[in-house]
Amino acid sequence: AQSVAQPEDQVNVAEGNPLTVKCTYSVSGNPYLFWYVQYPNRGLQFLLKYITGDNLVKGSYGFEAEFNKSQTSFHLKKPSALVSDSALYFCAVRDSYSSASKIIFGSGTRLSIRP
Amino acid sequence: DGGITQSPKYLFRKEGQNVTLSCEQNLNHDAMYWYRQDPGQGLRLIYYSQIVNDFQKGDIAEGYSVSREKKESFPLTVTSAQKNPTAFYLCASSIVRGTGSSYNEQFFGPGTRLTVL
């Protein structure tokens, strides 16, 4: 069975500082990992994904994520936070052994960037 | 949110009534999904469909029904059997065909907020 965990309900960062939003996963096969962002009363927007290859994945709006197989983690990072990055972030995983259409979402982490 | 529309944006329902949420996409995607979002619980899959005239139950299908008569449309009916329907409902779509189709991300609509009065 596949699962994904986001251990922090909220992350608070000062503008200009680096940010990290944590995600860990559990799958039977190879993981396909995704990050999405949600602004208030909106749908989710895709940020980036890891399928294979380089462990550091670059995505939209200056975000990147690092895949760590030994720690089963896929943390989202940004070198310098902006106030506009404040939103709800979801990590998601699909197991290579599972149905092609089904992915599991984490519970979300609220990122708050203070000016 | 581009390419997927959901209507209405806000919906109010009296207890005992069925309501239908609309989801339409013009991305030519084969697969469509319905999720329910509650505070602190992330997204939970209600139903999904990979092809016209076929759909599968997700993790929380009880009290919901869907149809997929057209590729572009995947309406969700919240029936009176759903005990706690107040939530934010999200529709999504993705590519299924082709090499690497398992890797493809889902595209989401703007959501419908349903409130039971």
Image (cartoon, coloured by chain):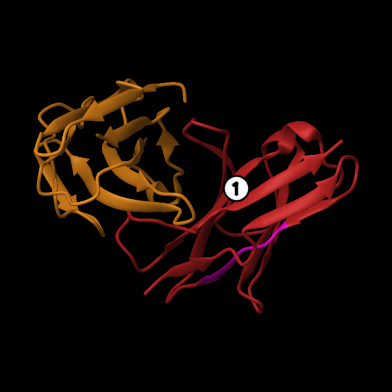
Chain colours: A red, B orange
Q: Is residue A68 visible?
A: yes
When the figure is inspected, residue B72 is found, relative to residue B39, above or below; the finding is above
Instruction: Look at the image and tell me in which quarter the N terminus of chain A lies.
Output: bottom left
Q: Which residue position is annotated with label 1? A: A89
Q: Is residue A91 above or below residue A42?
A: below
Residue B5 versus residue A82 in the image, above or below: above
Which residues lie in the magenta part? A21-25
Q: Where does residue B73 sit, x and y in percent of width and height?
A: 21, 26
In the image, is residue B35 above or below residue A71? above
> Which residue is at the front of the view, B92 or B71?
B92
x 83%, y 40%: residue: A114
Residue A48, by quadrant, is top right
Along the viewing direction, whichever of B49 and A97 lies nearer the viewer: B49
Screen quadrant of the C terminus of chain A: top right
Q: Is residue A101 visible?
A: no
Q: Residue at x 41, y 65 (%)?
A: A96
What main secondary structure does the magenta stretch of the protein show? strand
| Residue in view at x 30 percent, y 34 percent | B115
